[in-house]
Image (cartoon, rainbow, N blue to C red):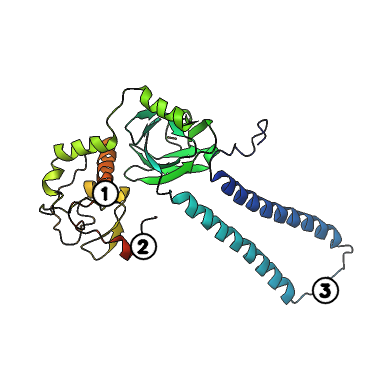
């Protein structure tokens, strides 16, 4: 908008317009009411001031019309804000299925980012324009918050937890990245930028450095090194559940509950295996808490996510998608 006085930051993502429209609506409604209340206050103070020492105003015994009006009008306005806000909230919290996943780890005082192809960056994120990017955000130490004003996204980075955000950049350029949660002495320096490039430029950028192993490959290696493969065999002969095809699907638990096997579930099952045991299995898995780093967890989760095709028949514990339509989009 106006660069001299950026009251509203540049709009550079597909959700920016929606967020701004809702913000301006709420600002407008509250502005009109604030102005109305002040004007009425001054008008009444003058109009109904005491004019003589013995003046006694008439008593008023309520007005049904007035009371209904000041109840129903705010109720309707608040309902619009609620429904509209919920719509934008759900849109902001449901990444499209075709999104590319970038992992984000906050650390005092930097942002560590990793692309699905394995490239790592610190304090800078290069993305292609027009492509949905899903961010899986966590922290290695304390609370941080991943904030890109031009994309209208802000999500806390919480140690021990994966938070999801997404954006689709609509224009190329460089956009500010901030930490929006006070995290210590150098919080104000925990900044960076998101560089949005044409898809061809992005491919060139990806190929520019040494090509690292993708998180999936790193995870596959860890899966063997940590001996996960001994129990989680693809042929359902192991002591642990078959992992092929479970990712993104609902899983039946021993407790009778169902949970969707998303990033957070896989992570929890590595660190606290007894928390959500799959139906039909014993809680025999040891914890890997303290043995795997955040980066290794991300790699393991990426590897489990890549095991999409059940090797033989249906993966144990996973329910057919047809029974659970709609459960995929969280
Ligand atoms: Cu990290 Cu403030």
View quadrant of ligand 1: top left
Instruction: Say whether residue 190 is visible.
Output: no
Residue at the disc numbered 3: 58
Residue at the disc numbered 2: 325
**Pick the front one: 96 or 157:** 96
Which of marks 1 and 2 precedes in the sequence? 1
Which of marks 2 and 3 precedes in the sequence? 3
Measured Cα–Cα span from mark 2 to mark 1: 17 Å
The x, y position of residue 72, in whole percent, is: 66, 69
Residue at the disc numbered 1: 308
Quadrant for the N terminus in the image:
top right
Q: Secondary structure at mark 2?
A: loop
Measured Cα–Cα span from mark 3 to mark 1: 78 Å
The x, y position of residue 278, in whole percent, is: 20, 58
**Pick the front one: 294 or 218:** 218
Horizontal arrangement in the rendering, residue 198 relative to residue 250 (left or right): right
Horizontal arrangement in the rendering, residue 3 relative to residue 324 (left or right): right
| Crowdedness near tag 2: few (<14), some (14–19) or many (≥20) residues, C-alpha within 10 Å | few
Q: Is residue 191 above or below residue 101?
A: above
Measured Cα–Cα span from mark 3 to mark 2: 65 Å
Which quadrant of the structure image shows residue 34? bottom right
């Amino acid at each position: 908008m106006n660069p001299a006085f950026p009251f509203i930051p540049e709009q550079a993502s597909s959700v920016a317009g929606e967020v701004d429209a809702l913000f301006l609506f709420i600002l407008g409604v509250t502005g009109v009411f604030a102005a109305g209340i002040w004007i009425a206050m001054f008008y009444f103070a003058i109009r109904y001031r005491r004019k003589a020492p013995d003046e006694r105003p008439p008593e008023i015994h309520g007005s049904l019309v007035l009371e209904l009006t000041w109840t129903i009008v705010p109720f309707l306005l608040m309902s619009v804000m609620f429904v509209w806000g919920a719509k934008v909230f759900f849109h902001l919290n449901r990444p499209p299925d075709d999104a590319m996943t970038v992992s984000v780890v906050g650390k005092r005082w930097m942002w560590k980012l990793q692309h699905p192809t394995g490239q790592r960056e610190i304090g800078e994120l290069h993305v292609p324009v027009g492509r949905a990017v899903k961010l899986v955000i966590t922290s290695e130490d304390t609370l941080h918050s991943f904030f890109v004003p031009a994309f209208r996204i802000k999500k806390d980075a919480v140690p021990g937890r994966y938070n999801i955000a997404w954006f689709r950049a609509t224009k190329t350029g460089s956009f500010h990245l901030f930490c929006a949660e006070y995290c210590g002495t150098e919080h104000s320096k925990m900044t960076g930028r998101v560089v949005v490039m044409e898809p061809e430029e992005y491919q060139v950028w990806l190929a520019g450095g040494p090509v690292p192993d993708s998180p999936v490959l790193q995870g596959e290696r860890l899966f063997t090194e940590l001996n996960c493969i001994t129990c989680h065999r693809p042929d359902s002969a192991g002591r642990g559940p078959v992992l092929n095809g479970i990712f993104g699907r609902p899983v039946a638990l021993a407790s009778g509950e169902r949970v969707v096997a998303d990033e957070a579930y896989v992570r929890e099952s590595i660190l606290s295996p007894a928390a959500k045991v799959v139906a039909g299995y014993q809680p025999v898995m040891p914890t890997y808490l303290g043995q795997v780093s955040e980066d290794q967890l991300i790699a393991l989760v990426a590897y489990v996510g890549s095991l999409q095709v059940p090797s033989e028949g249906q993966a144990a514990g996973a329910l057919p998608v047809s029974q659970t339509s709609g459960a995929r989009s969280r």
